[in-house]
Amino acid sequence: MTIAPAVPAAPRRRQTLGELKELQKLAFSAIRRQLTPSNSMQRTWIDGRPAAKVVAEFIKPNERLTSLERIELYNKQYWFRLLDCLYDDYPGLRAILGETKFRRLRIAYLDQYPSKSFTMRNLGSRLVEFIEANPHYLALRIDMCMDMARFEWAQIVAFDGLMLPPLVPDDLLGRDPEKLTLALQPYVTLLEMGYPLDEFVLALKKKSLRAEASNAMEMEEQSSSRKRTVRLPRPQKIFLGVHRWNNSLYYKRLEPGAFVLLNALRDGQTVAGACAAAVESAGEQDVDWAGHIHGWFQTFTELRWLCKPQS
Amino acid sequence: MPANRFNAFTDLGIGIGLRVPHYRHILDNKPTCDWFEVISENYMCDGGRPLEVLDEILEQYKVVQHGVSMYFGSADKLNREHLKRLKNLVKRTKTPFLSDHLCWGSVDGTYSHDLLPMPYTFAAAKLTAQHVREARDFLEVPICVENVSSYAEYHVSEMTEWEFLSEVVERADCGMLLDVNNIYVSSRNHSFDPYDYLRGVPLERVGQMHIAGHSKYEKYILDTHDHPVLDPVWKMYEHVIERIGPVNTLLEWDAHIPSFDEVHNEALKANQFVARVLKNGNGLRNRQRERHEALTV
């Protein structure tokens, strides 16, 4: 590489704040444009002009790279970084869909829902919404993919979501269940799924720590050579609580009645109302409901899932 | 080491970035390390394992926060939610000062998650300095801004990068996190002399330095943080500490991360240059002279 003397900047007049904003918008629109299938920058601009001509209007070339080639480095980096983040956060969805379909889904999703958060932790926060509206990206396994997307987002929430002071027995002493309301910890997600995806994910990979943010450049998107090695599950209705214990991620299978009870509590029903909803949903009378409900509350309290409602 | 108002008069020594693959080793073995730099955004969450690890680290080590998404140079207003979360973390870590980058990276609330190069204009410098001041006033800790590596330049620029950095830090009256690897990478990508850069910035404002490795390609250099520090970067590091004396120094290693010991040993190579400078007395003499000049102006 040869070093040429620096070319002094010679602007005609000083940039205004409005022009700065417009320049950043223009540059970002170039950086955010989808890459071609061969991971290059698109050669045609949004309005049909050559992209090289548009980019050359605001980016300087140097003796080795054109303006387009220089901005292309950022264009690639933008997509590789965000695609990699979803690749890491959704290993189950990747395993169901396969590499090609999963990549197509990620690109379409990020195109419609670019990051609105300072942290990439939230990058997948609207993925369920997106695939509900665009099921054609999922091919034949729509229900399973929907369940998996909800399940994997629940894991992100459980990993580092807020924990409020857990309920202790004293909080319940002398309280009238007809008036008492309780809440679920914000980091706990309740899921009703049509497939035993907890077993499927455990078989794929047990992930305990998220990768961290770094802005160092990466030259390649993550490997797409990983093959699915775990058989897809057969349909089976399950109820799951996705949570953490001692800061490790867990999935707890729930009885249908317990699932109804917890959902009712989360919806703001009183303890008595939630218990009645659980009994009613089962439709069985010859059951020791008092014992069942006592056991559930004991478990939920031990797991620290319950807390006081926030005003 | 030059403790100054830009780094809250700290004399931390040689540290490394706290990274996930090293958590277990650090928590189990409690190895000696002068200090750790933590990526703020990794701990700006509401709970869970990240904060548990951080709290354990804080019991044993000095920690300084380093951010990657404040985007002082974005034309957008600063994100208040981000600032609030950052302030909560500042209270938790008791970081003596913090740093983030001299770059932009968001437009109308959409984030690139990249450190995009600034157009070097007076309007951009003024806005960036205003954002640094706003953040510092809110967070109530000194802020050092870090020069980024870059791969593109704008026609509209009105000055060099080092003039822009100087303009921003003087206007904001803040410190610099001088990344000599970034300067080297940009100097090769934009064909300037990195020592012009070092001569052109107010080194007395350096509160911290970064060193790191990079990767060379046929037509450009990338700031990959996946190698040991290269010789030209060590020479620049030595040049700076000869001028100002040893300063809080941190090695960044973010990809293909080797063992804790390997990363730490690479960082500790900085001590060779520190020892040489102290032996020659250059840094001390220069600092004393600069202090004398400051007093007599």
Image (cartoon, coloured by chain):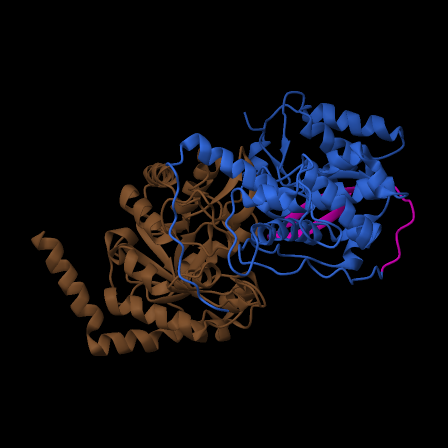
Chain colours: A blue, B brown
Extent of the magenta region: A230-254
Residue B32 in sight = no
Quadrant in the picture for residue A182 = top right
**Quarter that holds the C terminus of chain A:** top right
Residue nearer the viewer, B296 or A195: B296
- Is-magenta flag for residue B126? no
Residue B111: give x, y in percent of width and height.
56, 41
Seen at 57% across and 67% down, the residue is: B217
**Does residue B112 appear left or right of residue B284 in this picture?**
right
What is the residue that sits farthest to the top in this orientation?
A: A179
Residue B288: give x, y in percent of width and height.
14, 64
Residue nearer the viewer, A165 or B288: B288
Residue B198 in sight = yes
**Does residue B79 appear left or right of residue A273 in this picture?**
left
Seen at 80% across and 54% down, the residue is: A99
Residue B48: give x, y in percent of width and height.
57, 49
Seen at 64% across and 20% down, the residue is: A179
Quadrant in the picture for residue B20 = bottom right
